[in-house]
Image (cartoon, rainbow, N blue to C red):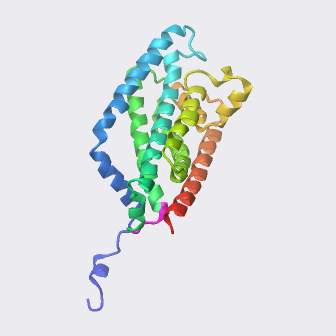
Amino acid sequence: MAGVSVAERAGPAVPRVPALAVLAHYLVGYRRTWRAGVFSSFLLPVLTVVGFGVGVGAYVDQGVGGLPYLDWLVPGLIASTALQVAVSESTWPVHSNFKWIRTYHAQTAAPLRVGDIVAGHLAFVLFRVLTSATAFLLVTALFGALRSPWALVVPAVAVLLGLAVAAPVFAFSAVVPSDSYLALLFRFAVIPMTLFAGVFFPVEQLPAGLRQLAYLTPLWHGVDLCRAATTGVAPEWSVAGHLLYLAAWAVAGWLLAVRTFRRALVV
């Protein structure tokens, strides 16, 4: 037909999603390194469940809240694993993309928008959280530690928890002048959260001041949701309250991450 271009004759163009191109970049790299994560994804959950759930649980005769200690502990371990994977993937990898290998600078020259860069990398972090949480869930299912079919929603809860943690950590990793600050983040935030946010014992056993701090952490909300899902016991907060709190962390972290990335990348 005269006056009609080849592209028009071929039909409407498929819209491109730049963030997916960024995600694909990280997936291509992960395809070459995924074997190194097999140990952490499968063997470490087995060792953790055996060491804490079976070993320590043998000394907890009456269980916790009417549940065997292993069944009570497992959801907390899944949530803490999601937290640690999210933080690990959001600290040194993000910092190095700014300071050392400067991947983000190359992506802005592609050109990609700052929002696409953040969304694509965050999507990869959530992929890592999802696969790790799912692997942990499968391992614990083999131990018979899942008491409710609602356990199937645990990977989704882990992804929301991962987003609530990873997004603000992206912003932190983008602005710190040295990677030594990332080690401080683990020492003064990740480790205390893991120890005192209800993973290994109920937060009700903490002094009142520390208990309120535990309630403020996103990990406690993730733990409570995962525990309700795997045990079939109602959470301490409402499910909607937990989800809204984690979503608030995720939205605030996203806005902060985009702002800090834009300041660092847009001259």
Identity of the residue drawn at 70% across and 32% down: 212
Tell me residue 26's x, y (percent): 35, 52
Tell me, yes or no, whether the highlighted magenta stretch contains residue 259: no
In this view, 23 is above or below 162: below
Evaluate whether residue 140 shows in this view: yes
Q: Please count the marks in the image.
A: 0
Residue occupying the point 38% across, 23% down: 46
Residue furthest to the bottom: 2
Front-most of 4 and 136? 136
Nearer to me, 132 or 194: 194
Name the image quarter holding the N terminus.
bottom left
Considering the whole magenta stretch, tell me its main secondary structure: loop
Check the image and name the residue furthest to the right.
208
From the top left corner, tell me how far across and down residue 204 is, in percent: 67, 22
Which x, y percent locates residue 58?
Answer: 48, 9
Q: Is residue 254 above or below residue 2?
A: above
In the displayed structure, 39 sits above or below 97; it is above
- Picture coordinates of residue 228, whole percent (x, y): 56, 29
Quadrant of the image occupied by residue 20: bottom left
Over which residues does the magenta segment extend? 111-115
In this orientation, which residue lies closer to the viewer: 87 or 45? 87
Identity of the residue drawn at 38% across and 63% down: 106
Q: Is residue 237 visible?
A: no
